[in-house]
Amino acid sequence: MDRTQGQVDPAEPSSGPARVVTLTAGDFTLTVNPVDGSEIEPLRPGAERARPRRRDAAGRAARDTAARPPVLPGAPASARLTPAREEERARLVRLLSHGRSVRLTGPSGSGRSGLLDAVAADCAGVAPDGVVRLSGYGQQQPGELLHALYAAVYEAPDERPLRPDREELLARVREIGAVVLLDDLEMGGAALDELLRATPECAYLLAATPDTKAPSDASHLEEVFLGGLGRAESVEFLEAGVGRALTEEETAWAGDLRFASEGLPLRFVQAAALLRQRDALNGTRGGDEDEEPGVFEERPRDAAYVPLPTLAEGAAPAELLASRVSESARAVLRIACALGGELPHHAHLPALVGDTHADAAVAELLGCGLLTPVGTRYRLASGVARQLEEVGYGDPAAEEARTAARHYAWWTGHASVTPERVAAEADAVLAALAGADVVAAVLLARTAAPAFAASLHWEAWERVLRSGAEAARKAGEVAEQAYFHHELGVLALCEGRLERARAELEASIGLKGALADKRGTVAGRRALALVTDREAAGAAAVSPPLRLAPPVGGAVAVAAPLAAPLAAPGLTGPTVPVALAAPAGPRASEAVTAVVPARRDAPANLAEVFAEPFPMSLKPSPAPALAPPVAARPVAGSRKRTVLLAAAGALTVAALGTVVALAVGSGDEETTPAGPGPKVSSTTPDVPAVGTDTAAEPGGNDSAGDPADPAGSGSGAVTEAEPGATTPGEGADAPTPGVSRGAGAKPSGGGTPSRKPPVVPPKTSPVASPPTTSTSPTSSPSASATPTATPTPTTSASAPTATGTGTGT
């Protein structure tokens, strides 16, 4: 592992050497400076990242030793498994040898850690990368576990520490083939699935408690549950711990204890310590305080007898065990209670306790079952902290935490302490930081943060920075608060969390600007520029979000090829152009969904629909020939609208025809007024010749220009004369279509009619003309209408009857 050397800072000669470490983090070069803050810059274009290499057998052995709890002074305690645990050990080794992953579930104190140690010795040569021991205590996400696995198998080829980015990390751990022993697992479900998917070539032995979240069904883990010891096994285990055979009374007491504790091995380790202490107390003689006053002669003294502990004391033995250990051991217990159960390394205990022999107290407490190994350290066993706090061991917690924080602030900032040693003591440092006052917390966080960054233990680095920022805010230390925010921004940038990095760096720049710290402001702006560059690169690489493009210019009429003649069955007439929205053209970097708005040219009422559908002049116009339909783009709902409009037009024509017929009939019954007046002679309308175009004729009834006939039926039709109808040659002049007759006008014959000819209502009555001659408005012809030749009407005895717009068949 890398050993960084200290460098002397000339700016502060009294503060000792400052440890400046340069490491590679993904695509960045990170310089950890404990004085002015970390500096980050991208890798130089010519510089290539060195590829990590796998550790050899010696390197793996050294790494495995570093992952174990420290060796305590004195004779090592021998670990012995019961016959039931030997069977489970053989089963676990067999499953791991076949590449199966196993989840070992058991309550706290069931002997999971001891069983893992035995399995590790049997699986040493199973996998190519050996056995890797990890601790999942306090780990809720798989990221740090993957980094720990990577650091256990790979090492940097040069002296510069290397922390890969996520892509390279996943690529490297996928190639690892090892037996991974993960103790104190605290995650499950999707997080555990992510860990297993990232390392498909590894076989896991996961030790967890029953209250840990269960794995998903897709994990395919073998389940092995650790139960309690049987009656015979508990007695045998207790005899091995005491070192002698049990008496009949002690055997009965052991049976009751097994029933109360469900046979947990930890309870029998503590019970064995109680029996050893009892033997030691019963084997000594009383002191001078037992003598009766006034008695000077020598006499034999009775040995002090200590009875067996009660069943309640055996089930919760922490108070009784602590009362019988040394004073240094009790002081160590008070420190552990102040740190939330975390026990500092035994090398720190003489300075914390004030006793040069305090390091031996750890072995004494471990033999009593008050401590348990967790990863690379020791902590109070399950339930011990609660039992000790009830009897007053947690009263001086504030003072003990303040003492530990000041001690660690001195130790972590010393140049002789490597970052790896600080990382191994991370849990105790974080516990001291949480229990100390704000002044001690700021000092400890300021010195411990660079060490955690250099050791690549970035989860502890982030926790220290957040705790330090909060303590600095409470203490009013603006300069320290700016430092912590800057480091948090650099950490977030290294991990790819750009939004968090921007927020932290902007806060740091603002605080440094208030302090007129030009050097710190420049460093913060450089890091912020890297954030901006990464955001721009990410925006170009990631597809843009979906957005809706508004219509440009409202509704745009579709061109002629798109305007298909939409006609209902049985109806003919001009086509109605459909208005569609022309979507705006998307830019190259945007994904646009075109929106077709509702028709904005929809009429408000029927008057707008049939504006000028019937011209005042009823000059007959032949029905044009139907043009071949033009292929058009299908429009949703257009056929239905066409049918509805055609039906409404037919009803309106029928109603108007009835009204006009009644008006014409009443006009013929009136007598012609006498008196002078303009004489208007009746003229016969010109009949268009075959092949002539009447579309541009004023008052014409061109079907192509009539907007009132959406069905395409034409504006007029020539029908045969009905029997009894008046013809031009029968003495009475019939009203001539298209010619207005003024007041007092006489027929062309010059005489007055003797009788009124019978009025036969036509199928569709012509529209009456106003008194003065007027020209009806001419509708503009449609662009899609084609002028066709019309047949010449017959001028025989039966005159044609002009009809209005009707329905064609």
Image: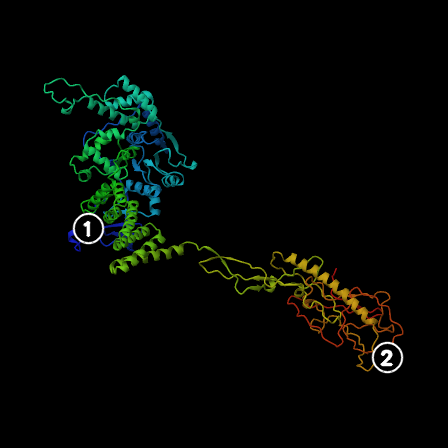
Q: In the structure shown, which secondary structural element does the residue marked by tag 1 occupy?
A: loop
In the image, residue 741 above or below residue 447: below
Q: In the structure shown, which secondary structural element does the residue marked by tag 2 occupy?
A: loop
Residue found at x 73% / y 61%: 651
Q: Nearer the viewer, residue 628 or 504?
A: 504
Q: Amino acid at mark 2?
A: Gly
In the image, residue 384 above or below residue 253: below
The percent position of residue 29, horizontal first and vertical second, equals 27, 52
In the image, residue 283 above or below residue 495: above
Alpha carbon distance from label 1 to label 2: 132 Å
Asked if the residues shown at circle 1 and circle 2 are in contact, with their CB atoms under 8 angstroms apart, the answer is no
Q: Is residue 635 left or right of residue 262?
A: right
- Check disc 1 and report the residue beneath it: 18
Q: Amino acid at mark 1?
A: Ala
Q: Nearer the viewer, residue 804 or 663?
A: 663
Q: Nearer the viewer, residue 361 or 595?
A: 361
Q: Is residue 298 left or right of residue 533?
A: left
Q: Is residue 201 left or right of residue 706?
A: left
